[in-house]
Image (cartoon, coloured by chain):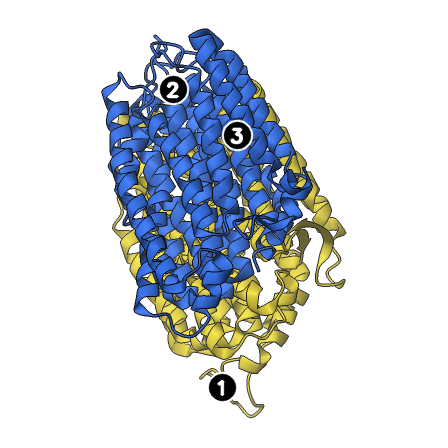
Chain colours: A yellow, B blue
Amino acid sequence: MLSLLIVVPLIAGVLCLAVKAEGARWIALIGTFVDLALSIYLWAQYNPDGPQWQFVEKAPLGGGVNWALGIDGIALMLIVLTAFLMPICIGASWRAIEKRVPEYMAYFLLMEALIMGSFAAQDLFLFYIFFEGGLIPMYFIIGIWGGAERIKASYKFFLYTLFGSVLMLIAMLYMAGTAGTTSIPVLMAYEFSKEAQTFLFLAFLASFAVKLPMWPVHTWLPDAHVQAPTAGSVILAGVLLKLGGYGFIRFSLPMFPEGSLQFIPLMFVLSGIAVVYTSLVALAQRDMKKLIAYSSVAHMAFVTFGLFAMNRQGIEGAMLVMLGHGLVSGALFLCVGVVYDRLHTREIDRYGGLSDNMPGYALLFMVFTMASVGLPGTSNFVGEFLSLIGTYHASSWAAIVATTGIILGAAYMLWLYWRICFGTQRNADAAAMPDLSAREWWLLAPIALGVFWMGIYPESFLRPMRNDVGRLMTRLERVQPAGDSHLTLGKGAVHMDMGHNH
Amino acid sequence: MGRFAPLLPELILSIGGTILMMVAAFTGRRGSGVTSWLAIALLLGATVALIGAPSHAGPIFDGFVGADLFSSFGKAIIFPAAAVAIIAAHGWFERGTEHASEYAVLIVFSAVGMSVMVSATSLVALYVGLELTSLSSYVLAAYRRTDERSAEAGLKYFVLGALASGILLYGISLLYGFTGTMSFTGLAAAFGRGAPTLGLLFGLVFILAGLAFKVSAVPFHMWTPDVYEGAPTPVTAFFASAPKAAAVLLATRLCVEGLGPATDAWRQIVIFAALSSIFLGAVAAFGQTNIKRLLAYSSINNVGFALIGLAAGGERGASSVLFYMAVYVVMTLGAFLCVLWMRDENGQPVEEIASLSGLAQTRPGFAAAIAIFMFSLAGIPPLFGFWPKLVVFRAAIASGYVALAVAGIIGTVVGAYYYLKIIKVMYMDEPAEPYARVREPVQGALILLAAILVSPLGYLLIGPLGSMTDRAAGSLF
């Protein structure tokens, strides 16, 4: 089943190369829809109270490597997110990409296969191969179909991420040598010595921090986003960044609990700087895509805050932030793409008053802006709220800094929205732009539905992950940080069960 | 006959090669096709003849050479690689060269030399094998003698190679003088008697320096870019593959079997050579505009990784070296076959990287093949070129050389830049003048085969190849 999830896009990708532009578009769309159907089937079949690893497959490749696949709830949700965004990406490229279409579609499908593989891999090296392999198609997508500075951006993207990852490879080799296994589930319960954990954590941090990205290694992201074609940005923000967060949950926390504990202050400081600094940078941007790119860095800091709070709310919140941000940032990049396709500029000043001539666009853009700000009822609210609660229990100072991110986030997003959709129409060409086409509605409306679904009834998404987070908590129990925020009003510490009851 | 059974591959090649020389002399230019195909048949026959006694007989001729799995694994790489080098020359020398047919004969003799190299268990056999290979190589490098660059390459290679041989021979004489033995086992016994004396150390260093020249490891790499650039492309393809693999294997056997007890003495030298090769190979390739020169630096860089496996030591380390070289030979031959196909519309070879511009749009299949080889040489997963690097680093870490592995792997990131540059030129730049179509179906099939082997499908080979290298390395211990 999981193999099918990986193989279907691969086959579709190869087929794309054999046909002309129009055929490639349809093959890609069908391929991604089949994958979406498969992932929904997985979601339906997934038993949240069942064993930790489901849909397990295993076939030895020799040399100590296994084609071992299997997912838990966390991986499942990220797979669903990927499968959901992919057809949207293909749709977003339908007319925006006119040159070398078959190749383009093939790279997208290859990327889908590799991302699915990284979420499903249960073997250390298999994970690494998928994880790293994702660089190649993205390098091509940015480098061939990107903007004016695409070459530089593609190099920066490739070398930055590669540099982070190779250190992780060394750590993986060490782990495989010490533990004598490459099975991720086994390693998640393996006890490495304390000193080893320190180094292993740092090595994995090098990789995931670049991927996520965390301050100060985020500088590749704005370049990559600005230069990438719209669909490339969507997949980059929506899914590729999530690989970093997924890595923390899958590797760093369960495999090196002591190592993680030790570095909580570092992670909080880096996340705190990221929240404040990148939010301020976002405020100053004149390029829409760059602004959203910086906002991604800030949002990802909520993920690290939540994860390294090392409590249930924090981790569940971090997962929801990832899912929510995957939808919202993807949608925001699509919104930028919509106006970019019409006017071919991302300069904020070239727009204004779009709510007059593009009311439908203004409506959807508003939904996503509000979601990005974290308005209650939207996906990001739930995630950010939970991860802030988690952070608060770990360190109230960290929570205070993190909360400023929400305020600043509201500032730059609302200001962006105001400058684009409201105000006077200064530019005749912007004022003459037609409203959303049917195709664009089909791209954005499903995301909007997802955003509301996640905001109003997050339980659908939390349920499959609950037991896995629980298992992670048992693993982290012995190292859980004490926290400084135990309010005692007669009945001892405030009970932290909100995760179950909202 | 029984005594000679372990030598069957060498016998086939030497006797066959001698006859071929006659054929070549009498048929002249007309016979180049026949000699080539016969030479290929000889090499493939010799590969088949590896089955049986040549793999298991153990030491023969009083420990002069050893017929074990290690040597037959090496020969199983070398003979086919030599055959590919002959196929690569098809249609290359016919124009404007008087002696087109001797090319195949020289390759066959070189293959005999290499096969002695990988089975050598005494210093004499080591030297004889090395010289037989080198002498053939000097001639091959200057094969286009009317072409200035080729003649220069040959001369340069000869002068520097002779110097290196001298150094090597001096080292051998020192070792012989201080131990009174030529055999690897005797050397091991001598080194095993406690800390090596100054004389032994000098001998060891000189021998390693000579070998470093042959594998083109830094700091003895200076000849490589010039010779690779100047030599005719099929010859360059040959140099980068078989002789290099043979020399690395020879160094492995010498270090493990002969100098095993002195591991601490040679390990630091190997580590230095490995890291400096990786970094110099990566950094010096930055500014290159000629693809053959770039691939020369790439081969220096790659040898560095193989040497990391050697430095790791032990059975695992030796096995990783074998694994690395086996995959490296496929990658590099594939890459050079592609270079061979870069021809302008008059059919003249082109070597400028800039001429690859926009190849993905004019010749998508060709560009994809080059991209596969480049990503593979860079060691980027999911291509198979990643796995040998992983195997080497795994060996280094298992022996406790984590810092070495970290340094090496940072080298891969530095090196990735110039491989990416080629891919960028092919995929992201505007199309330049398209290349002429080359009608060489056999070469095309070989490129395809090599591309499939280093594509992700190659991971299916991990099992069989891994167990083969393990057993081959095990025969050294």
Q: Position of residue B51 (x, y in %)?
A: 67, 39
Q: Height in image: B299 above or below A432? A: below
Question: Relative to A489, is B234 on the left or the right?
Answer: left
Q: Chain of mark 1?
A: A
Q: Nearer the viewer, mark 1 or mark 2?
A: 2
Element type at mark 1: loop
What whole-number distance in Å separates the C-alpha atoms at marks 1 and 3? 89 Å
**Residue pictured at 43% horizontal, 48% vertical:** B124
Q: Say which residue label 3 marks.
A: B14
Residue type highlighted by circle 2: Met
Q: Residues within 10 Å of mark 1 (few under 14, many from 20)?
A: few
The quadrant of the rendering that contains the N terminus of chain B is: top right
Query: Which chain is home to disc 3?
Result: B
Mark seen at residue B342? 2
Q: Foreground mark, 2 or 3? A: 3
Alpha carbons under labels 1 and 2: distance apart: 74 Å
Between residue A450 and residue B338, name the one nearer to us.
B338
Q: CA distance from mark 2 to mark 3?
A: 34 Å
What's the residue type where badge 1 is placed? Leu
Q: Have a look at marks 1 and 2 and say if they share a chain.
A: no
Whether residue A328 is visible here, answered yes or no, is no
> Which residue bears the numbered disc 1?
A487
Q: Residue at x 40, y 45 (%)?
A: B127
Q: Which residue is pictured at 46% across the width and 70% down the height? A: B192
Question: How far across and down, in percent of the image, does residue A60 sit?
Answer: 69, 51
Residue in the foreground of this view, choosing between B307 and A344: B307
